[in-house]
Amino acid sequence: MKHYHHIITLLLMSLVTVSCNDSFLDKYPHDAATNETFWKTEKQLRAALYPCYEAFSKDAIFNWMEGSAETCLWGNTTQGIAKVSGGTLSYTAGFPVTTYWSTSYQSIYTCNEFLDNYNRADIPQAVKDVYAGEVKVIRAYCYFLLTTCWGDVPWVDHVITASQAYMERTPRAEVVRHLMEDLDWAAKVLPAKRQLGKDVGRIDRWGALAMKARIALQNQLWEEAVQAAKEVIDNSPYGLMSDYGMPYKKEGDTEINPANNESIIFSLYIPDGRMHNVTNETCSPVDYIRLNASKSLVDAYLCSDGMPAKAGLEYYHRNDIATSTLYHYPEDHYADYFKNRDPRMYHTLYCPGDAWPGGDDGDKEDRRPNKTFKLPRFSSLQGGINGANSRTGFYFKKYNDPDIAGNFNMSHNNLNIIRYPEVLLIYAEAMYNIKGSLTQQEIDYTINKLRDRVGMHRMILTELQAWNLDLQTELRRERRIEMTLDGMRYPDILRWKEGELRMGRAFTGPSERVCINDLGGNPYPDTGVDEFGDVIFEKSKAEGGTRTFDPQKNYLWPVPYAERVKNPLLGQNPGWPE
């Protein structure tokens, strides 16, 4: 485990010196403050608060919690994140195993440094407690990531010495209980009003309760999840924007658009300061796509009449469910995938006819850069890197900023950590797990608010029964569709124990029929097609490839080898080599 050093200068050196109109991202003072003299004023607390917020990172949302699953597929299958979703992760891997363990504990150290010292400030206690409440929510998020992937982890709530770092892991349930207590305290001291103006981006009472609801759900504390979620739903100033796609655009950033009352906790990015690379990783005119939308996501979208387009993995090998007559199956052309679907698809994925930032697409009749998207581009068919080469044939529109396409690390739209829709979905899932069912009133209180917002056919219990659809399955589908790229797909799969179904199988693209009709051939002729006729780009073990999911070990990550060498007391998770 990382050796913790009680030296404030290390904290100072880590600060990113950016400014944002006198916001809480103010520049850190340039004087050489020491640990003995620093923690005195509110201005100093604000300066020390910012590096705590760095824990809300693009890497945690996209690479880790999305890229480790099967909705957002990493473009290079030889790299570490792809090996997580493929079940081939090595227990000695530096990235992502050691990297994410270490960065999480570095963030926890920063939070602990703050919490050990904030009471020294000569300002009213209530003001100090607001800062501490924010930091406890951030620390809870770090422990949420750790416990989701490793289960038992060392609980460290103060800065510790090198010798104190040699400790055993704390049981997951005990860590989570600490987090529930921290978040209860934070909810009591944080302000109930939204933080706008110079405080935009700071966590409020409702952020603490939303984080509590998330962590409670992940750890099957159903009653606590329901209670926290209901408090946010009934009493907070948060709600749904009329435009589903707006919270993912720079025009929807809360500091620009205070009408965004949907983003409860978000990671604040600013032009020419703190920026990220999501646009280039989702659709770039000059490189391959790193964050690829999966075929299973495309199949999961319901048709506009509320019925499934096909059985899909949701009803794998079921032939008794009703499917929509609005969908043309088997598909003849690429455009068929996008006809008459849930409107959220059109905000989430690039569809034929959309304005296109990806340069030359896959239209074999037009090899020039395209302004309108028609067909996906595969390097094996088109050649070269000029154009948005995809692994799956599907592209994310969500979070993509066409204005900076082709410019690396220039995205500055905020990244959502928790949106109001997640709280609605937490309530629905937790209540279902308590009762084994939901009433139509409870569905209207949660799911149908989301569907009404986009003009989607409502979820009606009697229709689900008539169509032989399972309520729990449909609740999970709703969560996947509504929360695509919200950084929760991997935790969801782990919580639902769907690893074998979702990740232990071949990863595919469009059907071979579509590829031949529209693209002139199969982009992956050497790997064949799956049982549904879709082209395979990465085979499972059953098909002679490497993709797998071992339920005896893959629901937890290996404890980092480098950390166990330094601290043998950490032990190892089941199924992984000692």
Image: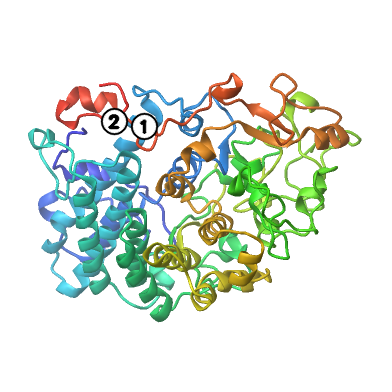
Image coordinates of residue 70 in percent, x first then y, are: 55, 40
**Eyeballing the image, is 223 above or below 15?**
below
Q: Nearer the viewer, residue 112 or 293?
A: 293
* Mark identifier at residue 574: 2
Q: Position of residue 426 (x, y in %)?
A: 43, 63
Q: Quadrant of the N terminus?
A: top left
Q: Residues within 10 Å of mark 1 (few under 14, many from 20)?
A: few
> In screen coordinates, is 323 left or right of 503?
right
Q: Secondary structure at mark 2?
A: loop
Q: Is residue 509 left or right of residue 111?
A: right
Report the coloring of the rendering: rainbow
Residue located 52% across and 58% down the image:
479
* Marks 1/2: CA–CA distance: 7 Å
> Which residue type carries mark 1?
Gln
Which residue is found at the position 21% from the left and 34% from the top? 2
Q: Earlier in the sequence, mark 1 or mark 2?
A: 1
Residue 506 — which label? none
Q: Are marks 1 and 2 in contact (CB under 8 Å)?
A: yes
Q: Which residue is mark 1?
A: 552
